[in-house]
Amino acid sequence: MSQMPQQAAPAKCPSCAEPLESGDLFCGACGYDLSAVPAAPPDHPTLTMGASGVGPSGVNWPPPEPESSSTHADPHLPTDLPGTDSGGTPLPGSAPHGSPGSPAAGVRFDRPPEPDEDYPLQAPDPRVAASAAENAESTGAAGAAKVCVACRAGRVDDDGYCENCGHAQPRERDHMEQESGPVAAVSDRGLRHHRNEDAFAVGCTALPDGTPAVLAVVCDGVSSATRPDEASMAASRAAGECLLAALPQGTHPQAALHEAIVAASHAVNALADEPTSAREHTPHQNAPACTIVGSVVTAGLLVVGWVGDSRAYWVPADRSSPPARLTEDDSWAAQMVAAGLMSEAQAYADERAHAITGWLGADAYELEPHTASFKPDRPGVVVVCTDGLWNYAETAEEMSEIVPADVALRPLHAARVLVGHALDGGGHDNVTVALLPFPAPPQGAGSA
């Protein structure tokens, strides 16, 4: 493993304003620990994106529970405990527990070190798969034999191997697609992981007055934990089912999304209740864990909720209008930027950037879902994705540039294009993206 680069220090000590040298880890005057991670910023209130006066949805929603409600225990802040990686080793530059200026905990790396070489069998490029499906449909060969994803020529036998080159074919979860009315999602294993540890749930429903609502949930398994693929699948299913049950009953979308994240957390926690014999084989591994991000879109309201570093972006249909990132990462990098200790470019270039400070799992600290609601004054699309995509389009402007202009007409095609962008960029991680139109169109509307 290569040596960890030194983090950049601010020009002045945040504690005593003493000038600092580049590469300083502690202030020479007061001893302030420059690597300390501050607490995460508070959630956003409901915001109007653009002009005010957006039409109401017509639903008499009860107000969401206040964040300080007594039904939720006070959360442990990331600064309560020292930071360690998934194996319990102090993060580089961390002071021992209990020492002055020890950095924040509740920090874990969301993936183990990646190998230098690609895996020999790559997941299928979604654009190639889509092209093959369209060709089969156009020729009427609905039951045509599958073509090998490795050599693109051999027929795949009943055992899942190519008769031409002998390659085993990808598992079903290596590449998943789903379209539910106007919302669509695509998930792909990527080019370097041996399995897909992402999962998603999408759906459309109606509010009590009949107005439409669409939803999407995207989860990213924490690779340094045990069974991350099961964690993400359990979380996405639980959250999706909770939303589909709550919204038609008139629950406010922001409250419904909060409860969906709690339900997802319970589903992941349940995976830790495994037999003693299973734990004996992996005694040092963390409990199953994942991140989560979700969105609910109605006729006049856009709601997002998350825990971890999966993200949601707003991309207006009129690309002359500014796009926006709607979530703030629960990560080491985000908190370093929030503290003013590093620039965003510096923080996300650091090897510790993807150390997350919030996740779903039995070994997580007190769960505190983030939620925010917005009222855009113009049509657009919400991009809900894992870091396997936003690593290749990090800013809102970069994400806006790669979203196809016809996303409202062909959401599944647009999702394939975005996954293809990540694969073209290297596909170093699993890639999952869901696209939701705003405002939610009438029921029955979908891809053209």
Image: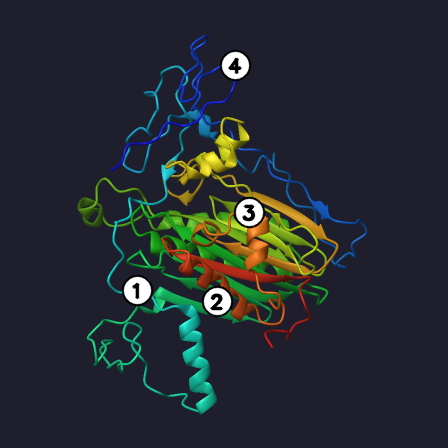
| Amino acid type, label 3 | Thr
Residue linked to disc 4: 15
Q: Where is residue 200 in the image (x, y as percent from the top left)?
A: 46, 60
Residue linked to disc 3: 395
Mark 2 or mark 3: which comes first in sequence?
3
Cα gap from disc 4 to disc 2, whole angstroms: 48 Å
Mark 3 or mark 4: which comes first in sequence?
4
Q: In this view, does 278 lie above or below 191?
A: above
Furthest toward the top, the residue is 29
Residue linked to disc 2: 416
| Amino acid type, label 4 | Ser
Q: Position of residue 124 (x, y in %)?
A: 35, 69
Cα gap from disc 3 to disc 4, whole angstroms: 31 Å
Cα gap from disc 2 to disc 3, whole angstroms: 20 Å
Q: State if disc 1 and disc 2 touch (CB < 8 Å).
A: no
Q: In this view, does 120 lie above or below 138?
A: above
| Amino acid type, label 2 | Arg
